[in-house]
Image (tube, rainbow, N blue to C red):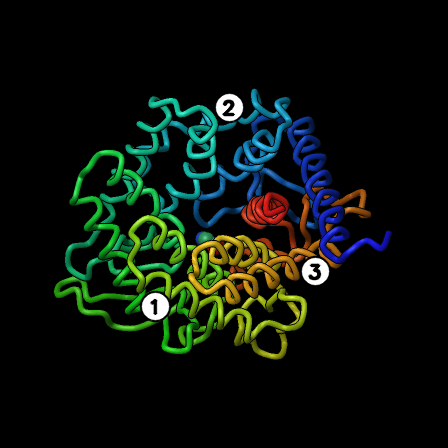
Amino acid sequence: MISSRSDSDRSRFLEALDFAGRQVRALVRRDPDFYPMYTREGRWRHELPAWTHWCDGFPPGIMWILCARGDDSWRPLAERYSRRLEPRQFDREVHDLGFLFVSTYGRWHALTGDPALESVLIQAGRTMALRFREKGGYLRSFVSEDSLFIDIMMNVGIVFRAAKETGDASLFDIAMRHCLTTRRALVRGDGSTAHEGLFDRETGEFLRQTTHQGFRGDSCWSRGLAWALYGFGTAYMHAGDPRFLRTAQDCADFYIANCPAGGVPPWDFDAPAESRHLVDTSAAAIAASGLLQLAGLVPDPLKGAFYRATARQILATLCERHLAAGDPHWEGILKGGVYHLHKGLGVNESVMWGEYFFVEALDRALRER
Ligand code: GLY
């Protein structure tokens, strides 16, 4: 029998998931209760600077995904690593409570339906909503009150969730207004995105686009675009507003039209010649997972099939060219992530969110048949 392309993808994706599980187990054995962010020369280290503290949900998130796939041996670890994050439902220092809690308590709740877990998610949503700036209409970034980040589109979902669970219309209004402001201020007409928007503190007037992690204010930072592609799809799932679906598609179409063959972008779509060789595999992993989600949302089945096929192509490229399997010294799963080029943090390394969204995308792709 001749095996098809999708059969070979399937076995490649299963092997990659298996490898991911082995790498996470090795991390837990080597360094119990450590939540790393990025590697240095392939090693997870304690002493590396973080810039902001946003990644602790990803190791347990991977454990929950592997647990939900049927390997119950992950369960005690997933619970332990999640439980230690519980106090952060009140954390007002970061804009990342979706990253921290959807990947952990959200997945845990999906398995058990335990209302005590939902109440942690609700509190995290309420805490997140406290970041709302009435003037300007956005959830402020961790940097300053006049700053809006594209990344927050991945975290606003927890405010929508709290609104639905509590029936609190003011939470729904905050989440809606944040998405509409982000769409207006950070998503451009061609579907590309800016990393950050700055607003007048007094009047709330939108002033300009700028960046921290991208090449420059008018460039398209690749991971930011992937956050938008995925985040607007999620916002559409929560709110049903067709404007969010349109925006998610615009971002997806920009990503696909501007990516090199294989679907792994340079760290910034407008990166200058001297750093253009640096890819960001984490952007590709996020985009793959976001495209698989979007494929199930678009009404046009041909478009859905196109997004699905593109996501599988991205995953195949990641497995073929960027998996750390075969390098016994490398402690991460995916090579070639970039955290913060300008600060020199996690450049061409494994990054914990890349690991998580890669595993999530593999799981999504494998569940499709
Ligand atoms: N701070 C989120 C990111 O680096 O994408």
Q: Residue 124 location, x and y as percent?
A: 32, 36
* Image location of residue 232, percent across then percent down: 38, 58
Are the residues tagged 1 and 3 within 8 Å (C-beta)?
A: no
| Crowding at mark 3 (Cα within 10 Å: few <14, some 14-19, many 20+) | some
Label 1 or label 2, whichever comes before in sequence order: 2
Q: Which residue is the site of mark 2?
A: 79
- Classify mark 2: residues with Cα within 10 Å, few (<14), some (14-19) or many (20+): some
Left or right? Give the position of 115 relative to 291. Answer: left
How far is disc 3 from disc 2 in space, using C-alphas? 32 Å
Q: On the image, numbered disc 1 is attached to which residue?
A: 186
Specify few, some or many for label 1: CA neighbours under 10 Å numbering under 14, 14-19, or 20 or more: many
Tell us which disc is closer to us: 1 or 3: 3
Residue that lies at the very extreme toward the left in this rendered image: 203
Give the residue type at disc 1. Leu
The reply to whether callout 1 and callout 2 are in contact (CB within 8 Å) is no
- Quarter of the image for residue 317 reads bottom right
Q: CA distance from mark 1 to mark 2?
A: 37 Å
- Which image quadrant is residue 179 in? bottom left
Cβ of mark 3 under 8 Å from ligand 1: the answer is no
Residue 154 shows in the view: yes
Q: Which mark is residue 317?
A: 3
Residue at x 62% of width, y 28% of height? 70
Q: Secondary structure at mark 1?
A: helix
Q: CA distance from mark 1 to mark 3?
A: 29 Å
Q: Which amino acid type is marked by label 3?
A: Thr
Q: Earlier in the sequence, mark 3 or mark 2?
A: 2
Relative image position of residue 169 (x, y in whole percent): 16, 43
Q: Secondary structure at mark 3?
A: helix
Q: Regarding mark 2 in the picture, which secondary structure is present there?
A: helix
Q: Is residue 45 above or below residue 76?
A: below
